Amino acid sequence: MNLDHDTIVAPATASGGAIAVIRISGTEAFNICDSIFRGRNPLSQATGYTVHFGRIIDGDRFIDEVLATVFRAPHSYTGEDSVEISCHGSNYIVSEILRLLVAAGARMAEAGEFTVRSYLAGKLDLAQAEAVADMIASSSQAAHTLAAHQMRGGYSAALDKLRDQLLHLTTLLELELDFAEEEVEFADRKELKRIMEQIGDEIEQMRSSFALGNAIKEGIPVAIVGAPNAGKSTLLNRILNEERAMVSDIAGTTRDVIEEQINIDGVQFRFLDTAGLRNTDDRLEQMGIERTLQSIEKARIIIRLIDATMLDRESLTGKIALPAPDFPLRDDQHLLTVINKIDALPDSKFASDIISISARNGIGINDLYQALRNIISDLFPNEGETIISNIRHYEALSNAAEALQNGLIGLNNGLPTDLLSEEIRTIIRHLGAITGRGMIVPDEVLATIFSKFCIGK
């Protein structure tokens, strides 16, 4: 990542639209734009947050009529003088304007370079900057809400609160070092332990939210499982409204896991059509069943699909309970029992918590969607609740949790004040790595983070 503060330029919109936006930022942004922009007045004389109509020219050659929006430092996204040129979306026009700006002294921006400048200018912390990329990549309302909360600083505020508490503890401990000869204890050890344990609980709560946050970001994994010929592939095709999975009356047709995504009411789901569960000597089918069990392990929601035509009369009339699933369930997993092919047995009755469908004819699919909505409403965090979805943040929190446990062990064992203070500072460093506040982030870390951004952001 080039961290020089020369003037950079890049298209800020994808190609193919009716309108395109080209972003320029840096100390020479106004002068460079004025070399090709002709309006009522030069942009270098314009006040910030103003929009100016004009023409882009190359000598005597007309390129396009444009709108130029002016942002003056430090009140811009990057904290630098910036201009955004809105032109027609022709690839030729965009490439010509970029060529002229580069010829006038600008440099093509690298991926994420505008946002890294915003971070370096203190406009965003590192966690907020990463949320910008998540916002752009969000494919559902839920993922967008999560990224928006993080970008607005809600997550960073929770981390700053923990950091401030830890800094207060180190301050008290270091005061003791200053008055070591008087043997004064500024930090009561019982109170110190209580506060550290409380901070540890909050760190653990953030860590434990990662599974849900990652699922929201990447899509809630839903495994469709059941015996061969229960209609799993037919159900997947019905949900997707396309013939994605091969359907056959031959048992064991599905040998591998088929994964597809669909957005239901603003939530992204990843549906996994799995191989049928049964005892078999077919080695290839056994491999498929092993992958089914792996999908069950990954899933947050499991749709247990049962073939109504394979049930006995007592089960169909609700006189006896259905057999328990033949796979383990975790506490954080939700099981939906779904009876398929109900159109073949229209008079059947089941318990209220069992969903009856016909995947082939679409009967009861809306009931299945409603059951998924009900589960998601329970899974989703309350407004403003801190949820992490970034693996880098999870690793930093894990390191902080480990350092905090080491500090508590040292505290219980009478660790000297100077060493105890250093243990707490280690926790602070790990938490600071998430937002970048209070520490110098190595260039290679910044390069890794911002390389995931698109050009122009």
Image (cartoon, grey):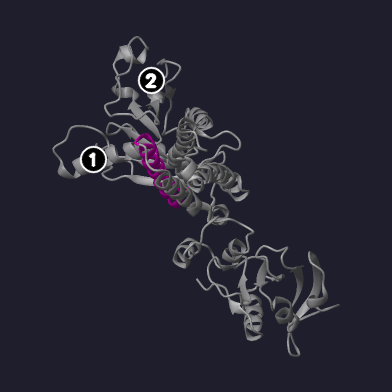
| Identity of the residue drawn at 57% across and 33% down | 382
Q: Nearer the viewer, mark 2 or mark 1?
A: 1
| Horizontal side of residue 138 vs 69, given as left or right | left
Q: Position of residue 141 (x, y in %)?
A: 58, 44
Dominant SS in magenta: helix
Residue at mark 2: 345
Q: Is residue 269 visible?
A: no
Q: Is residue 121 above or below residue 365?
A: below
Residue at mark 1: 290
Between 292 and 233, which is closer to the camera in this rendering?
292
- Magenta stretch: give its range: 389-413
Q: Are marks 2 and 1 in contact (CB under 8 Å)?
A: no
Between 444 and 164, which is closer to the camera in this rendering?
164
Q: Is residue 405 magenta?
A: yes
Please count the marks in the image.
2
Q: Position of residue 356 (x, y in %)?
A: 43, 24
Q: Position of residue 166 (x, y in %)?
A: 51, 43
Q: Is residue 13 magenta?
A: no
The label shown at residue 159 is none
Q: Quadrant of the C terminus?
A: bottom right
